[in-house]
Amino acid sequence: MFSLKLTKIGNSLGLILPKEVLARLKLAKGDEIFITEAPEGYRITPHNPAFEAQMKAARKIMKRRRAVLRELAK
């Protein structure tokens, strides 16, 4: 478990993430993170949950329409 501290950045507040957390999330300066609500609290992830849902739907369609997509690729 890591403890995060809020710090004032201009007129806003920011979190300082320890190096170990940045390494585990594979994050670097300028990367975007997403915070979503979960049943047990909040979840921080470098992956966009909306994009993941769209990709799941796309994979389902691609699997179902494989023959059509193969013909279109020709």
Image: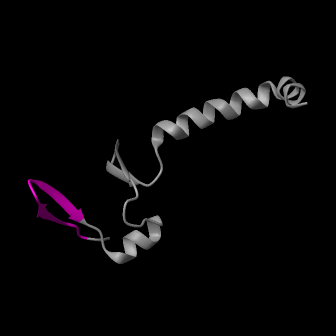
Question: Does the magenta stretch mainly form a helix, a strand or a loop?
Answer: strand
Q: Quadrant of residue 44?
A: bottom left
Camera-side residue of 28 and 25: 28
Residue 31: image location, x then y, percent: 40, 58
* The N terminus, quarter of image: bottom left
Q: Is residue 10 left or right of residue 73?
A: left
Residue 2: image location, x then y, percent: 29, 71
Give the image's coloring scheme.
one colour
Q: Residue at x 38, y 70 (%)?
A: 21
Was residue 12 drawn as part of the magenta stretch in this picture?
A: yes
- Start-end of magenta stretch: 3-15
Q: Is residue 27 left or right of residue 2?
A: right
Q: Quadrant of residue 52?
A: top right
Q: Quadrant of residue 4?
A: bottom left
When the figure is inspected, residue 27 is found, relative to residue 42, above or below; the finding is below
When the figure is inspected, residue 55 is found, relative to residue 20, above or below; the finding is above
Residue 48: image location, x then y, percent: 46, 44
State the residue lying farthest toward the bottom: 19
Was residue 5 drawn as part of the magenta stretch in this picture?
A: yes
When the figure is inspected, residue 20 is found, relative to residue 64, above or below; the finding is below
- How many badges with numbers are in the image? 0
When the figure is inspected, residue 33 is found, relative to residue 74, above or below; the finding is below
* The C terminus, quarter of image: top right
Residue 56: image location, x then y, percent: 62, 35
Q: Is residue 62 left or right of residue 41?
A: right
